[in-house]
Image (tube, rainbow, N blue to C red):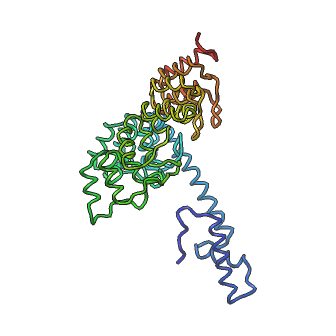
Amino acid sequence: MSQALPARPNLDWLRKTAKQELHELRKTNPGAKLASAQLALAREYGFRSWRALKAEVDRQQALASSGDQTVAAVLRAVGTGQIDTVRAMLAATPELVNAVGPHPFWGGRPQPLHVSIDTKRRDVFDLLIAAGADVNGSNEHNEHWSPLMLTVHRGQPEMRRVLLERGATVGLVEALMLEDDALVEKLLRPGKSALPAIEPNSGSILAFARTPFAIDRLLELGVASDRKDRWDTTPIQAMSRLGPRGRPLVQHMLKRGIAAEPQEYARIGDKDTLAALIAAKPDIAKSDAVMMGAVDFGHYDLAQWLLAQGANVNAHSDWGSQGSALHSAAWNGDLRMVKLLVEAGADVTARDPEHNNTPAGWAEVAIKVTNNPDCKDVADYLAGLDGRTPS
């Protein structure tokens, strides 16, 4: 009997396999040709010729590509809130509810349920749940972020409640993010082996600790405090990117002897520490990273104070799309911060290097991508300036 082709056959892999078989053939027949090995391999898979095998692989790859386009279409419909389109696509092809495909807005290969949580589309989320979406998700290609983790990260308690009621698994990472110290203690009890072999974001699980108890327990177990994830972010940096919520965590990490950079203090709004640092080293006030930290997390008084200390009103991020402070505030739908920056002379016509878009353009995109109605007010305000700064 012939063997079946792999689920996603790859012609390059088959060619390499044929060359390996040729190597074996030449042990008994030194004059064997590659065509003979390819024919033998084709017949192992039930094809009369290498050409017939190649044609089948090409056909399957075309089908896979077409299928991926269909999945991409449903994921984009989910992410942009086109509920009627999603409903129709699921009615026609029910298995799409748990299909894995490219994220419509950023990296990874999530499922529709992940995207509905990412974009805070509660109506689409409910539709997917009713259609049989897996509440635990297939997370291998989504940096191992489960739907439950996303509900915490995106601040969606009602979606979280639905997932838990439907039996979503609460593993160690979820317990950490849910601040469930009792469950964390149970999972990390001596004799247990609950530390995951694979950690989300390919970094340290410490980045997901949300209580001092969890920080201490993980450090006791030898979890790395300085290991960076795929975005070059350490645990204390990840905690600072929680903004004000991360302040007690950063402070606890400091007590444990883990150092922070000035921008970490800006993200959590710790003006007193920043003032002391700037008094000793004035150039810190001019750091783009410090200014971005204040803007990203809505620390208005701090941003105003930094500008008075000589901060760059057109500071740029050093990662991602590398937009300006005004781009960031526009994306967040933070009209108060946008006005603060514009009145301080921010360039409303600046374009980011990745998307070549203005702050107003970012706000327009964010209306759909983040489902944040406040972005409409920002977009209208910036569009009304028409390249001018207010008098």
* Residue at the extreme right: 31
In-front residue for pair 272/115:
272
Residue 200 drawn at (x, y percent): 44, 52
Residue 269 in sight: no
Query: Residue at coordinates 59% horizontally, 33% vertically from top-left?
Result: 316
Residue 55 drawn at (x, y percent): 65, 63
Residue 71 drawn at (x, y percent): 51, 46
Residue 347 in sight: yes
Quadrant for the C terminus in the image: top right
Query: Residue at coordinates 28% horizontally, 41% vertically from top-left?
Result: 161
In-front residue for pair 214/370:
214
Give left or right: position of 113 versus 283.
left
Number of disc labels: 0
In the rendered image, the vertical position of residue 205 relative to residue 294, given as above or below: below
In-front residue for pair 165/42:
165
* Residue at the extreme top: 391
- For residue 163, what is the image quadrant? top left
In-front residue for pair 62/169:
169
Query: Residue at coordinates 55% horizontally, 61% vertically from top-left?
Result: 8
* Residue at the extreme front: 280
Residue 104 drawn at (x, y percent): 53, 41
